[in-house]
Amino acid sequence: MPTSAPDSDPPPPPGCPAHSGQASEPGRPEPLYGPEFAADPAAVYARLRAYGPVAPVELAPGVHASLATGYATALEILRSPDTFARDPRRWEALADGTVPMDSPIVPLMMYRPTPMYTDGEDHERYRGAVSDTLNRLNPHTLRTYVEESADLLIDLFGPEGEAELLSEYCARLPLLVFNQLFGCPPELSETLVKGMAALFDIDEDAMKADAVLREALSALITTKRAEPAADITSWLIAHPARLNDEEMTHQLILLLGAGVEPVKNLIGNALRLLLSDDRFAGDLSGGTMPVDDALDEVLWTDPPVANFCTHYPVHDVTVAGHRLAKGAPVLISMAAANNDPQLISDRRGNRAHLSFGAGPHACPAKDPARIITSIAIEKLLDRLPDIELAVHPDQLRWRPGPIHRALAALPVSFPPIAAKYDAVSAAATDQNPGGNAWNPSPAPSTSTRSPSTPKDATSTERGRDSGNAAQRPWWNSLITWWRGR
């Protein structure tokens, strides 16, 4: 556990950015964007600690904030909702136009009617709806969704003996799982998954992707209001909070935002550790440390959300000797706080990290996130026990950005394996457009990488726990899309 935070902080010593100009001009806040920060954020955090447990940073050009890098100070802020609010409508620089609405960081920080961006009664209402809904998830059902989706994806690249895991596995798996958790009917499934994928793809038009996603969610909400089922969407609609359609859309987007991109990055970061760290690499099927320990390790050292949990002081306040102005954003650096030099060094079995936040706004979905991540990793290592990185670990690159800690790619190689389920080639599907999508027949594959549909895949009505229902008709169209056909 951390020692107590100092009562005051010394002036910046020689060598910190304020004096030396390292990574920023003298007197300017440290930038948290660009390739330099992505390549070595630990070095930036080390320089920031020269200021003390709170330091000035720049999130995007012209967007200034304070960053809590000390563990004790971060906890103090996270647990003080009366002093540090979460509602971005308190952000004075955004309200007065100093920060333009078209700044790339604004969409991640602007107000939305969800528990992440509200306080008081509104926060309690939204959080109650989200938490109660997540608590209704059956862990066995969730595990089944993850295992089925993992098998589908592994069947796609397994026969080739190589893959780029980040795009072909880590990113796609949570998309498939949430598509099922939301209870999407076949006619909306492909649109929703494509919209979610594009929203998090920096090469896509974010506004267009957002419009596609909102349209799909609006149609989903309309469908579920008319025909509720055992799924997240229906449970949110039926909750006593009585969410309207706009509120429903934002809760679903929040769940997607929290459950897709961060989970993708958590799976990728954990696989990187497993495939490159001597404590794990070598014999992954019976390594010296289990997957859960690897997951805990990466949540301490490389959390998928590195800097976030934005707060706004409700009045001028002094924290650890630093004056924080009313309405000026203060972010929590989960990455820096978790690696605070004042913390104990032995972390095995210790889950006191801040990767899921703390206090009244702590992430309510940490348990489902761990289930999805751990099962995704276990399934991959079980089916590809001889998997190896295709490049030296030092050649792996990180995506730039102040919020996430995310690999740009994760190339691997392994002995090719046969698909687990009967293959249905995209070419055969194209040649038989009038075929029964609910019961496709096996066909010879014309490609090395064979798409497949699990024989025992159940419908989205998993709440009825059939275990052997009809196949999901949208999987084939998603396979075709992912293959670029």
Image (spheres, rainbow, N blue to C red):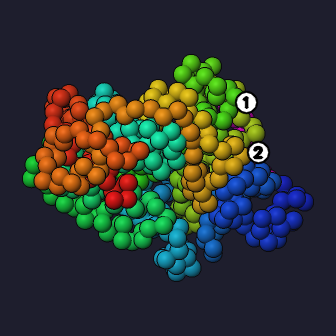
Q: Find numbered disc 1 in the image and state the secondary structure of the residue it sits on.
A: loop
Q: Residue at x 60, y 46 (%)?
A: 334
Q: Is residue 13 left or right of residue 32?
A: right
Q: Residue at x 72, y 53 (%)?
A: 40
C-alpha distance separating marks 2 and 1:
20 Å
Q: Find numbered disc 2 in the image and state the secondary structure of the residue it sits on.
A: loop
Dividing the picture into quadrants, the one containing residue 117 is: bottom left
Farthest residue, direction bottom: 97
Percent of width and height locating residue 328: 58, 66
Mark number, residue 345 = 1
373 over 79 or under it: above or below: above
Tell me, yes or no, if residue 324 can be seen here.
no
Percent of width and height locating residue 255: 36, 50
Helix, strand or loop for the magenta stretch, by majority: loop
Q: In this view, does 52 lie to the left or right of 230?
A: right
Q: Is residue 447 left or right of residue 317?
A: left
Mark number, residue 6 = 2
Q: Residue at x 20, y 27 (%)?
A: 467
Quarter of the picture holding the C terminus: bottom left
Camera-side residue of 464 and 169: 169
Q: Residue at x 69, y 49 (%)?
A: 395
Quarter of the picture holding the N terminus: top right
Percent of width and height locating residue 74: 62, 47
Residue 372 is inside the magenta segment: no
Of the residues tagged 2 and 1, which is closer to the observer? 1
Percent of width and height locating residue 203: 48, 67
* Crowd around label 1: few <14 · some 14–19 · many ≥20 (10 Å): few
Q: In this view, does 466 lie to the left or right of 320?
A: left
Residue kind at label 2, given as amino acid type = Pro
- Sequence-first disc among 2 and 1: 2
Give the residues in magenta. 1-9
